[in-house]
Image (cartoon, helix red, strand yellow):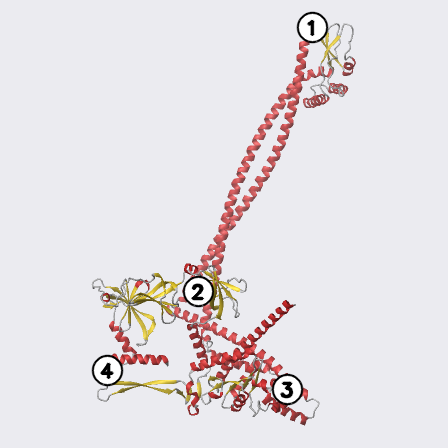
Amino acid sequence: METLQKNFKKEKSVFSTSKKKKNISFSKNEKNRTLKDTLQAGEILTVKITALGSKNIGVAELKNGYTVLVPNTKCGDKVQVKVEKIFLGKGVDSILNQKIKYVLARVDNSGTKTSNFEKTSNSLKFDFKVGQKFQVTIAKKGPKNSGLVPVAKNFLFIVPNTKVGENVVIEIQKIKQNYAFAKPIFSKQMNVAQGNNQIIGQQFHIVIPSSAKTIANSFVVKLNGEFVFVQKSLGVRPEDTVKIQIQKSTGTFALAKILKISPISSKEKKAMVKETVQKMIQSSMHFGEKAIRCNANMRKYIWYRKKSLGMYANSKNTFLSIKETKKPMVKRGRHVLNVFKTQRCFAEALKQLAKYAAKGKTFLFVGTKKPAASLIAKTALLSNTSFFVNTRWLGGMLTNWKTILKSISQIRPILKQKQKILQKILEKREKIQRRLFNKVYLLRKKSQKFMIKGKYLIQQILRSKNFLIEKSQKFIQTKNAIFSANTLLLNASKNLKHKKIQILKQIQQLEFAAAEILKQKQQLKLLIQSNLTKFNEIEQFFEIGQQLLKTKDSVQRNGDTTIVALSYEKLLTLQNSTLGDNLKVTATLPNPSTKIFKKMIAVVSNLRKEENGFFATNQINNLSNRAKSTDNSGASDPQNAGVANQQKTILLSKFLNKFILLLPFFKNSLQILNERLVQQKKMLKELNSTFTKIIESQKSLKQFYKKTISQLTVVSSKFIVQQNNFKKFQKNLKQFASEQRLLKFLPKLRYLPTSQTKMYEIVELFMKKFVDPKLSYPMEQIYDQKLKFTSKKIAATRKQKWQRLEKYFGGITKMAKMNTKQISKNVAIIIGQQEEMNAVHECRKLGMKIFAVVDTNCNPKFVDHIIPANDDSRNSIKYILGEMLTYIRLGQKLRRKVSLRAKIQQNRKRRFTF
């Protein structure tokens, strides 16, 4: 209604300024025509730039409702402009009731650009631009908590959310002829320089992040580049929007206090109000009683419609004046309540209810109308600390409390049993109902989605009839392509695996060959070493034999000396003695040591065996027997002398004398050993060359093996990609199949997306027909158990009496423990004031606070908290009682939490005292 009044006033001004007063028409079609005719693309206009917007775009406003946007201009210029584009904006013009039209124009180069504003006194002498930053001090206080900064006599900066005397860095947002709008930027350096005193006391709306750290019972939050410690209070949790006030600040951090949790913005408030109003209208809360029964005190809460009557002169039909008249809105002979006022009253009443519940007060629900009776009983039972009267209010039910207590005492034990049973049944029923609602809601959502998909499919089929066939052919092509690619990859992987196995076998064979060659090498090396040792020994013996031959030859040349060969025993006896008078021993040839002597014998024996009879075996045995006689002796003394007749004699052992005979044999064996060694070295070289070849072939095979493995990995990765593609293809196929099913099933789905109210009705019907009969408990069993041992007459009379008392006092039995003073502290919630006037008067006598659903035939003066709404329809009563129940429960929860905290604090204090 307020918006209608504003539009009407603006229309009034249009009437007065119009030149044509005879034929005035308000049709929207004609307005659209005039606007379209006035401006078109390509037209040339002369425009005054009154403001500068973002990116220094000039803004000019025309009388016909257009706003012209001209780039590369200055504020105060008069410009000739060519229209390029015309487009609609988001805003609505209040005079024309249309969307604001914007015109994008460019400066016409052919036209002249004049600056008439510079000649006037109100000209803009400063060349400001949008986005420029300045450091200023706020000089004056402006409207709506803004600050003013005078730049010159006729120019100001308007800075919002600032105080007088603040040093602020500002950024220009919009420029007009005599003023500019600027945005404050509080820099960190300024805050540190001023000791952050300007932040103290300021209030901010922030969202506490989910990753916020907690230190010493406070959240750590970053605000304008500084750390702020927000104290945990009012049950704050992460991801909550909070209103904070900064109390202390230093150069590095600040301390803040929480004022409010989740402060709602104006847009959110409007959205919430819209939702509540829609729910109220759906539940038919706005229908009042018949217009004849309307109470004079309820005229405030009725919806009025305004009518405008124009006064014209008779002669010339000249428009003289406009009068406004208020008339109440009536539908089907009933007044319509103003829903916005009911919303305000209802919100205030709910807040007050929650406060009373938090304080620990109990509630008395009163409503004897048929639509309200069952709902009142349910709400009273669900809110644990409440009582109800839903059949008839007897006179003196609260004022004559002593007499009523007597009748309550008769039925109190029966009602206790009944209430326990009823609570269990109601809890079960609520759970089943919630499940049903959730299932139905999910079905409704799914059906809506299916309907949207079905419409989309039908549109595509209408565009191209062969849509499904083409799609199926594409699927077949993709399927064939995927299968062919998969077969190729499988064959490639099989070949590569076969190659891999072959290479591994070859590598194993080479390893075996290399191991055998190594064994042969080791054996050859051992043979070479043994042959070398033999060669060295025989060479040494050959040298000894040659030296003996040389000595023999030299002795034989000289006739004076003779060599005498004796056994070792005789040599020992003849040491330092003479064989006769003429013979004297001049020298003895030394015998080798026992070790060398044994080696010599072993070599001679081995060589004899090898040469097959170079010497007789008997001679070898004689040599060995002779050697035994010399085993225990070392080198013979140089004093031993040979036997000769007056000549020089050299004594010699018989073994050495015979050893000289073996010299040709030694020579032959040395030649044979030398030939063997040469052959064995050649064999070693050949083995080494083959071993190197095997190693090289192994390296090449290993490289080839690595290549095959890399190829296998590439093939396997491609195969995985193909598998993923196949999975996607399967999903798409399933979707295609489901789309085809959906097209068949669409005619049945049109019945599913019904309205929510119908869904609720269907669920309630289902509950009544199927769920409630199973949940019902035969209450008469309680009476029968108590009246077992009485006669039929007494049982029938007592049963009737108990049933009658239950009818009237069933909801007040829990009040039996209360006094009149305690009853007066209760809060009464009355539905249907006109029918429950006795209850209202009694509650007022006791001084109880009254919440009442007041219709147009009721008097709101008898009630403390008014809820102007329809008190006859079941839906409106259900909505009101449901909201009341939620707020009562919230208050009760808060009370429990506070009591728990108080207990915890008391326990802590006790611990500290002990």
Circle 2: residue type: Ile
Q: Dot 1: within a 10 Å radius of its alpha carbon, few (fewer than 14), some, or many (20 or more) residues?
A: few
Q: Amino acid at mark 3?
A: Arg
Answer yes or no: do the residues labelled 3 and 4 have beta carbons within 8 Å?
A: no
Residue 421 x/y as whole percent: 62, 82
Dot 3 falls on a residue whose secondary structure is helix
Sooner in the amino-acid sequence: mark 1 or mark 3: 3
- Point 61% across, 25% down: residue: 676
Amino acid beneath label 1:
Gly
Q: Which circle, 4 or 1, is nearer the viewer?
A: 4
Find numbered disc 2 in the image and state the secondary structure of the residue it sits on: loop
Q: Going 55% across and 33% down the picture, which residue do you hit?
A: 689
Foreground: disc 2 or disc 1? 2
CB under 8 Å between discs 4 and 2: no
Residue 559 has which mark?
1
Amino acid carrying label 4: it is Lys
Residue with the mark numbered 4 = 21
Name the residue furthest bottom: 793
**Whole-number angstrom distance, CA of label 3 to CA of label 4:** 82 Å
| Residue 290 position by quadrant | bottom left
**Image position of 897 (left or right of 650):** left
CA separation, marks 2 and 3?
64 Å
The residue carrying pointer 3 sits among few (fewer than 14), some (14 to 19) or many (20 or more) residues within 10 Å by Cα, namely: many
Query: As displayed, is residue 787 above or below residue 130?
Result: below
Give whichever of discs 4 and 1 has the lower sequence position: 4
What is the secondary structure assignment of the residue under circle 4? loop
User: What residue does disc 2 label?
Assistant: 199
Q: Is residue 176 visible?
A: no
Upstream in sequence: badge 4 or badge 2: 4
Where residue 412 is drawn, which disc sits there?
3
Mark 2 against mark 3, which lies toward the viewer? 2
